């Protein structure tokens, strides 16, 4: 298929989808499905007379006015899309270290706020606890779990960014004279970040556990759990890094589509 | 016979989609083909408008959507398969009853009952 045809089809989809006030994830899904539809229609139309331009015109006519579709799509987002938008407030996968740091911190604040809402919902249940000690213990557990995620999440997200750049970014070091050096530096940074996160996660977990229980020697009995937490952190950072790279690859063809004219 | 389009279809599209999915799961383009065949080619629907209707049905739990695993040479664009949920089947049955009642009442007013 002619690249110009694909570009025209993408443009039609983008005219309908770009103005939507929905999450990036939602936009990505709608784009993909509408493009798959248009490509299918184009193949049907092309099979009738073999004329690509005529087939394109018929495809667009069948599809309808993108502006009308935008209005219709705006009312069709799932109810939880608002939450997704809130979590995407800092944007999609970052491309610079500075953006990655900002995104990690914003995400931590967002999760902290969401947990605040959850805690507000839990307070009535906590007030029903029988003894003062139970209440104190419950409050401490909630406080430390909230504080732990606020510290833990930025580390995880930033490690995932470094991991993505180190292992999954197809353009790592490409087109630069010192490409080998850059790729090597990224590799070391990615490995170090994941190693650090793998060590930090159990340390934070152990500290939180000791503070909640008020019994630091008891932390030693939980060593296996904290080691598992560390390993899970490393694996999660890798998986998030990989998923973000896939997301960026899907986003790439749409980034430069001009919808005016 | 005159083609049926625009406002005449609005309000019935959701039930028509549910009815088309009754014969089995499928993706949007094939679903349009089913609607076209069932309507003897007289339904004139802007194809893009199918998707907001499908998304609303999915959000309401009346249909279930799942991405197809492969892109079939569609430039990395996957299709989404839709199937009818149990709630969707109940809604379809209710939609059919409402349609029969609608035709009976309006047909009576117009003097066009069969």
Image (spheres, coloured by chain):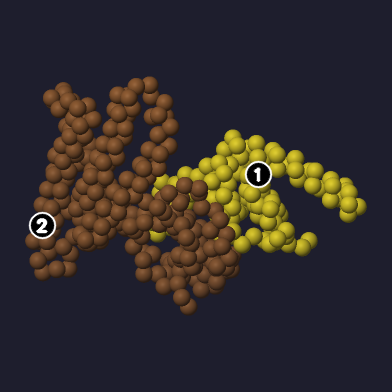
Question: What x and y, as percent, mark residue A250?
Answer: 35, 57
Query: Closest to the observer: B76 or A65?
Result: A65
For mark 1, what is the residue? B19
Query: Farthest residue toward the front?
Result: A132
Chain in brown colour: A
Q: Are marks 1 and 2 on the same chain?
A: no
Residue occupying image coordinates x 19% and y 53%: A162
Left or right, residue A130 beside residue A13: left
- State the separation of the CA atoms marked 1 and 2: 58 Å
Q: Residues within 10 Å of mark 2 (few under 14, many from 20)?
A: some
B75 on left or right of A64: left
Say above or below: A247 vs B20: below
Tell whether label 2 touches label 1 (CB within 8 Å).
no
Disc 1 element: helix
Instruction: Report whether B35 appears left or right of A162.
Output: right
Q: Chain of mark 2?
A: A
Residue A238 shows in this picture: no
Residue A164 or A134: which is nearer the viewer?
Answer: A134
Quarter of the image where one finds residue A171? bottom left
Q: In the rendering, what colour is chain B?
A: yellow
Q: Which mark is residue A185?
A: 2
């Amino acid at each position: 298929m002619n690249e110009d045809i694909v570009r025209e089809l993408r443009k039609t989809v983008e005219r309908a989808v770009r103005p939507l006030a929905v999450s990036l994830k939602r936009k990505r899904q709608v784009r993909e499905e509408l493009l798959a539809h248009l490509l299918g229609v184009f193949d049907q139309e092309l099979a009738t007379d073999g004329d690509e331009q005529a087939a394109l015109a018929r495809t667009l006519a069948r599809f309808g006015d993108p502006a009308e579709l935008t209005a219709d799509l705006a009312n069709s987002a799932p109810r939880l899309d608002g939450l997704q938008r809130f979590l995407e407030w800092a944007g999609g996968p970052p491309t610079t270290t500075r953006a990655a740091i900002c995104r990690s911190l914003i995400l931590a604040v967002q999760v902290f706020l969401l947990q605040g809402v959850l805690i507000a919902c839990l307070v009535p249940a906590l007030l029903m606890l029988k003894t003062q000690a139970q209440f104190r213990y419950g409050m401490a557990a909630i406080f430390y779990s909230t504080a732990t995620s606020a510290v833990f999440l930025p580390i995880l997200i930033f490690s995932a960014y470094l991991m993505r750049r180190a292992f999954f970014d197809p353009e790592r070091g490409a087109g630069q004279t010192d490409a080998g050096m850059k790729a090597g530096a990224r590799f070391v940074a990615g490995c170090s970040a994941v190693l650090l996160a793998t060590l930090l996660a159990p340390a934070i977990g152990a500290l939180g556990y000791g503070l909640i229980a008020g019994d630091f020697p008891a932390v030693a009995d939980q060593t296996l759990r904290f080691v598992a937490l560390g390993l899970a952190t490393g694996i999660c950072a890798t998986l998030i890094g990989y998923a973000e790279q896939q997301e960026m690859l899907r986003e790439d063809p749409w980034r430069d589509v001009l919808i005016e004219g | 016979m005159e083609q049926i389009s625009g406002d005449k279809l609005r309000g019935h599209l959701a039930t028509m989609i549910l009815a088309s999915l009754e014969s089995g799961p499928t993706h949007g383009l094939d679903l349009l083909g089913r609607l076209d065949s069932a309507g003897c080619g007289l339904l004139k629907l802007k194809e893009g408008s199918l998707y907001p209707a499908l998304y609303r049905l999915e959000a309401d739990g009346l249909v279930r959507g799942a991405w197809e695993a492969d892109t079939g040479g569609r430039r990395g664009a996957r299709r989404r398969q839709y199937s009818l949920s149990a709630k969707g089947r109940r809604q379809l049955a209710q939609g059919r009853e409402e349609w029969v009642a609608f035709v009976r009442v309006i047909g009576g007013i117009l003097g066009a009952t069969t």
